[in-house]
Structure formats: structure tokens, C-alpha cells
Amino acid sequence: MADIFVTYGPWLIGIAAAFGFLMAWGIGANDVANAMGTSVGSNAITIKQAIIIAMIFEFAGAYLAGGEVTSTIRKGIIDASYFTDVPHLLVYGMISALLAAGIWLVVASALGWPVSTTHSIIGAIVGFAAVGVGTEAVAWGKVTGIVGSWVVTPAISGFIAFLIFQSAQKLIFNTDSPLDNAKRYVPFYMALAGFVMSLVTIKKGLKHVGLHFSAAEAYALAIAVGIVVAIVGKIFINRLKMADKSDRHTQFANVEKVFAVLMVVSACCMAFAHGSNDVANAIGPLAAVVSVVNNNGEITSKAPLDWWILPIGAFGIVFGLAIFGKRVMQTIGKNITHLTPSRGFAAELAAASTVVIASGTGLPISTTQTLVGAVLGVGMARGIAAINLGVVRNIVVSWVVTLPAGAGLSIVFFYIIRGIFGG
């Protein structure tokens, strides 16, 4: 089958690059709301500001920390050894998976549904592998773990968000002098945010740049960052000028301003970590195609990235965010429940904490489901009436549909591409 790669190699790589860009476009349109949705929904920043901030940090994460080498099979979801004798089917399948997942993400983004880009590409890869080679090529245990994460991940992040929000209510908002208590306690929230966000960035981002820290070094560095953030935050908060006789409403408004600043910082960290981690959903299958074609059918577990692959992922994310990003931001930030900066901060910090817990335990995770769970947790803290159940129902349905939708589209495209190129 090596003659297929000789005859059609440049075509296969070109098609894979185009569909890889479409997939990255979908990631930008749908997934970037994870980092920016709560900031926009709580009016800490405008949609225009969010798009500019996310463009900078998502691009930096994807391009600077997206990785020199990527796994050819994302998340180990299929066994590449089954394709050793039929490498062209792996190439056709990866191209089909990119197109299928890309189209699904564009449709979901147009409808304002926050779905998982990771689950979209995994569903697509499972689809072509099951029909192209056989169901035994799929690691079904991993698929079961992903389905389980639909419940586990939002539940963990929702519980953490509920606790953070309730603690802020108890320590700050439900007291006689909210501003004084904000000055006392917010630096501790800042320290916790600095610790968690730096841990997310170290674990998810910096490993791709070649900076490798041991667990002890990562935690020590994160603690140091948390302490510095708390000190800087304390200085900033102490400079807030307010009359002692201000009414509670004005005090609340000033407390929310403090949380708003905190949210923007945490959103930047989340955007960088997201860009570095999830760009692999687009460039992993693309790198697999390029590697197999250039090696005349030899399949390796890791594929070195050609110089042009990372920019395709990075620019795709930025374009998708700029053109379609605000629809999903609207769903997460405004449509599930009413967010203020303090509520949005609780959700964002809970989501980041869950990402850290998951990466430490190997739990399959979707940042989208993590954040939606956290926003629900904040809403639940104010009572079930504070949540728009119709929006939540649509989101849950879109999660369940994502795997089969990716798989179904991928199967169709797989047969079309196989029919065109043969083999």
C-alpha cells in the first residue's frame, strides 16, 4: 500500500491540513468559552476584550507550548498495531475524524452548545476504527471512562464551586462590613487562585516547552506564586478608597470589582493552559497523517511535528474564536445562571482545581463539562430557581450526542475517502 502514499501523499497531507484547520477552528469557536465565558457573563470584561485576551493567550499556549512531539493516537483510544498492515486506513480514518469532529463543533457552536472537543475527536476516531478495522481495535475501557466522566467531572467541579461560593458568602457578603472582610479574606482567595492556576499552567502547558518539573518542584513553585499573588493582591486591595459610611450596595459593588480583577488573571491562565493542551485535538491526527505518509506507511507511537503544523492549530483556534466564539460564551456566561464576578471567580477556580485533580489522577476530563458543572454549582448555591433548567437540559443532550455524532460522521467520511483513494 506504500504506492498510495507515493501517488497521493501530498494530496492526503493537504486534505488533512485543511480539515485540521477546520477542527482547530471548531476548538476556538466552542472550547475557548471555557476560559472566558464566566468573565464575560459576570461583566468583568466585554466580549470584545475577552476575544482579544483569549486570542493572545490561546495562541501563545498553542504555539509556544503546544508540543514538539504529539501522540499519534489521541488518549490511546485505539490500538495502532491493528493498522500495521493497512496504514492507509489509519490515514483515511484520521482525515475522516478531523472532518467529522470539525463539522460537529461548528454545528454545536452555531447552536451555542458547549460540547467537548476532546470527546468529539475521540468519538470520530472510535467510529472509523470500529468499522475500518474492527471493534477489537478500540480500547472500550477508555470509552467507558469517558462516558463516566459526564457525571463525575461536573459533579466534582460543581461541589468545589458550591463550597468556594458559600465560603465567600459567609466570610464576606453576609457580614456587617463586607469591604473590610473582603480586604481581610480576598488575599487568601488570591493565593489559592495563584496556586491552582500556576499548577494548571505548569502541568498542562510548560511540559510542552521542554520545562519538566517533578511533582515536588511543581507544587513548591505553585505555592511560591500563590504567596506572591496574595501579597500583590493585598497591596492592591488596601489602596481601594471608600468612605466608611458607604451603603452595603456600594460596598458589594467594590467587593465585586476586586473579584473582577482576579477573574481576568485566572482567565488568562486558563486560556494559556487550554491552548497548550487542546490544540493536540486538532494537530494530533494531522501529525499522525503526516508521519505515516512521510514514512511510507510506518506507524510510530509519537510523531515529530513539522514546522507548519502548530501554526495551523494556533491560527485555527484564533479564527474560530473571533468569528463564532461569542455564542458559546453567551451560553456559559449568561444563559445557565446569573453570574457576578465573585460567582464567576468561584466557578473558574473550581474548574481549574478539578483540572489539577484530574491530571493528577488520570481521570479523563473535558474542560467544558468541568466549567458547566462549576457554573451549575454556583447556581445551586442560590437555589434551583436560579438555574435555567431548559438550557442545562440542552447542554446535557449535546454532551450525550457528541460521541455518536462524531462517530457517525466519521464512518460516512471514511467510506467516501476510501472510495476516492482506494485500498
Image: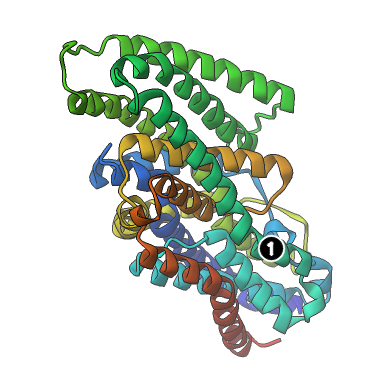
Q: Nearer the viewer, residue 332 or 338?
A: 338
Q: Nearer the viewer, residue 127 or 248?
A: 248
Q: Residue at x 57, y 59 (%)?
A: 118
Circle 1 packing at 10 Å, graded few (<14), some (14-19), many (20+), is some
Q: Is residue 82 above or below residue 192?
A: below
SS of the residue under disc 1: helix
Displayed quadrant of residue 108: bottom left
Amino acid at circle 1: Asn
List x then y, in percent, for residue 185.
43, 18
Q: Residue at x 41, y 21 (%)?
A: 186
List x then y, in percent, for residue 278.
55, 51
Q: In the rendered view of the protein, which quadrant contains the N terminus?
A: bottom right
Q: Residue at x 39, y 16 (%)?
A: 233
Q: Is residue 55 visible?
A: no
Displayed quadrant of residue 384: bottom left
Q: Is residue 93 above or below residue 235?
A: below
Q: Is residue 70 visible?
A: yes
Q: Is residue 339 above or below residue 322?
A: above
In-image side of 337 versus 396 (left or right): left
List x then y, in percent, for residue 293.
68, 67
Q: Is residue 45 above or below residue 173?
A: below
Instruction: Specify the color scheme.
Output: rainbow
Q: In the rendered view of the protein, which quadrant contains the C terminus?
A: bottom right
Displayed quadrant of residue 316: bottom left
In-image side of 233 versus 11 (left or right): left
Q: Nearer the viewer, residue 217 or 292?
A: 217
List x then y, in percent, for residue 53.
34, 39
Residue underneath mark 1: 294
Label count reads: 1
